[in-house]
Amino acid sequence: MKVLITFFLILFISIEINAQEFKFEKETINYGKIAQGSKGTRVFEFTNIGEAPLIIKKINSTCGCAVPKRPDKPIMPGEKGQISVSYDTKRMGGFSKAITVFSNAKEERKMLKIKGLIE
């Protein structure tokens, strides 16, 4: 029994040590004041700071007005990746939206935000 517990403890520790990680340059993008109908695409840039390929499984947005696009391929250790978000700038007024990134990183869910004011 002790051998079995020790085995699972070592397995758990080794998984945690080798987990993938990513670091975003910015976790919030502020569009600021922009004109109605202007270009609404912004890019979140990140680096895989882990020791294994980082796979973005899916990305969800809090509404259909913000459409995220994930990388098609795994991001290798040390490489940079991008997540683009297109916001519908035909809608007037202020906005604040959350984008949730699901991946194989140590922190499986990462929350990103966009905000701004369309005049």
Image: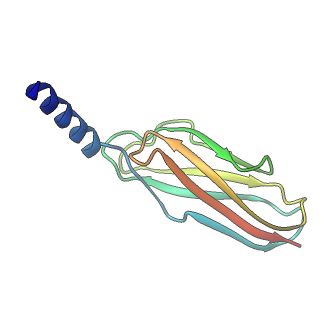
Q: Nearer the viewer, residue 15 or 24?
A: 15
Q: Quadrant of residue 23?
A: bottom left
Q: Nearer the viewer, residue 51 or 65?
A: 65
- The residue that appears at 28% across and 43% down in the rendered structure is 16
| In this view, 104 is above or below 97 | above
Rendering coords of residue 111 (x, y %) = 56, 55
Q: Residue furthest front?
A: 1
Q: Quadrant of residue 34?
A: bottom right
Q: Residue furthest left?
A: 3
Left or right: where does residue 80 sit relative to residue 78?
right
Rendering coords of residue 70 (x, y %) = 60, 43
Rendering coords of residue 52 (x, y %) = 33, 40
Query: Which image quadrant: the C terminus?
Result: bottom right
Left or right: where does residue 84 sit relative to residue 64?
left
- The residue that appears at 30% across and 45% down in the rendered structure is 51
Q: How many marks?
A: 0
Q: Nearer the viewer, residue 28 or 53?
A: 28
Query: Which image quadrant: the N terminus?
Result: top left
Q: Quadrant of residue 13?
A: top left
| In this view, 12 is above or below 31 | above
**What colouring method underlies this structural image?**
rainbow
- The residue that appears at 64% across and 61% down in the rendered structure is 113
